Image: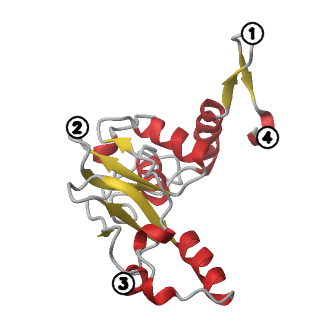
């Protein structure tokens, strides 16, 4: 499966917030735009943290326990430091990082360290599906088979390819240096 550089898979439109902005502003931005996260950036445009739906749920818990949220700033609830990936990294590296760190959103940085985009699990799934060359009938996919450039796929081939991906992602080195496969996905 040909995995592209992250910069070709990522979303370039990213909702951001500064650490000193009010939490209520962050939540309102997420609600209005229907975003599941905001990237917190410093004055130079470098990611310093993330505010995700999980952070908002933790805030709700604090509010239910009596914390006054009206004066809280984004930095008070953000997850930090931001876990990032370079735009030149391979999408396979991004999959491994998302899996290892148990995250759903990965800010992408350029060579200058500034925010360049965001990579989500949805972006990676869309990319993976687009890599399958056949439709559900086993024929070569044609442009626009189901719209958005994502062809229908042969489910047997999908299962085979996904097993290969999971095997690659779940192979780890044991102390002797040989590869050991975790079999929970096979």
Q: Which secondary structure lies at badge 4?
A: helix
User: Which element type, helix, strand or loop, lies under badge 3?
Assistant: helix
Q: Where, by quadrant of the figure, is residue 40 drawn?
A: bottom left
The residue singled out by tag 3 in the image is 25
Say if mark 2 contacts mark 4, CB within 8 Å.
no
Q: Nearer the viewer, mark 3 or mark 1?
A: 3
Disc 2/disc 4 C-alpha distance (Å): 37 Å
Colour option used: secondary structure
Q: Which of marks 2 and 4 is in front?
A: 2
Which badge, 1 or 4, is on the more N-terminal residue?
1
**Residue 111 tag number:** 2
In x, y percent, where is residue 181? 74, 26
Q: In which quarter of the image is residue 3?
A: top left
Q: Which of marks 1 and 4 is in front?
A: 1
* Residue of label 1: 176
Q: In which quarter of the image is the C terminus?
A: top right
Pointer 2 or 1: first along the chain: 2
Secondary structure under the numbered disc 1 in the rendered image = loop
The answer to which of 12 and 69 lies nearer the viewer is 69
Q: Which badge, 2 or 4, is on the more N-terminal residue?
A: 2
Callout 3: 10 Å neighbours few (<14), some, many (20+)?
A: few
How would you rate the neighbour count of disc 2 (Cα within 10 Å): few for under 14, some for 14-19, many for 20 or more? few
Label 3 – label 1 distance at C-alpha: 52 Å
Q: Is residue 125 above or below residue 38?
A: above
Q: Could you tell me how far apart the alpha carbons at marks 2 and 1 are, in whole angstroms?
A: 36 Å
Where does residue 28 sit, x and y in percent of width and height?
39, 86
Real-space CA distance between mark 1 and mark 4, rounded to the nearest whole angstrom: 22 Å
CB atoms at circles 3 and 1 under 8 Å apart?
no
Residue farthest to the right?
184
Q: Which residue sits at x=33%, y=54%?
A: 47
Q: Nearer the viewer, mark 3 or mark 4?
A: 3
């Amino acid at each position: 499966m040909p995995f592209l550089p992250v910069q070709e898979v990522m979303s370039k439109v990213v909702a951001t917030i500064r650490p000193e902005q009010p939490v209520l502003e962050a939540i309102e931005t997420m609600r209005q735009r229907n975003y599941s996260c905001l990237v917190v950036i410093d004055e130079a445009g470098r990611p310093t943290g993330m505010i995700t739906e999980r952070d908002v749920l933790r805030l709700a818990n604090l509010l239910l326990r009596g914390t006054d949220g009206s004066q809280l700033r984004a930095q008070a609830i953000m997850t930090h430091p931001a876990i990032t990936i370079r735009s030149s990294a391979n999408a396979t590296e991004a999959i491994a990082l998302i899996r290892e760190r148990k995250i759903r959103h990965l800010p992408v940085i350029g060579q200058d360290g500034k925010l360049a985009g965001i990579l989500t699990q949805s972006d990676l799934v869309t990319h993976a599906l687009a890599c399958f060359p056949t439709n559900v009938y086993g024929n070569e996919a044609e442009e626009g088979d189901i719209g958005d450039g994502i062809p229908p796929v042969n489910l047997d081939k999908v299962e085979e390819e996904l097993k290969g991906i999971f095997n690659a992602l779940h192979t780890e080195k044991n102390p002797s240096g040989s590869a050991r496969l975790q079999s929970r996905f096979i």
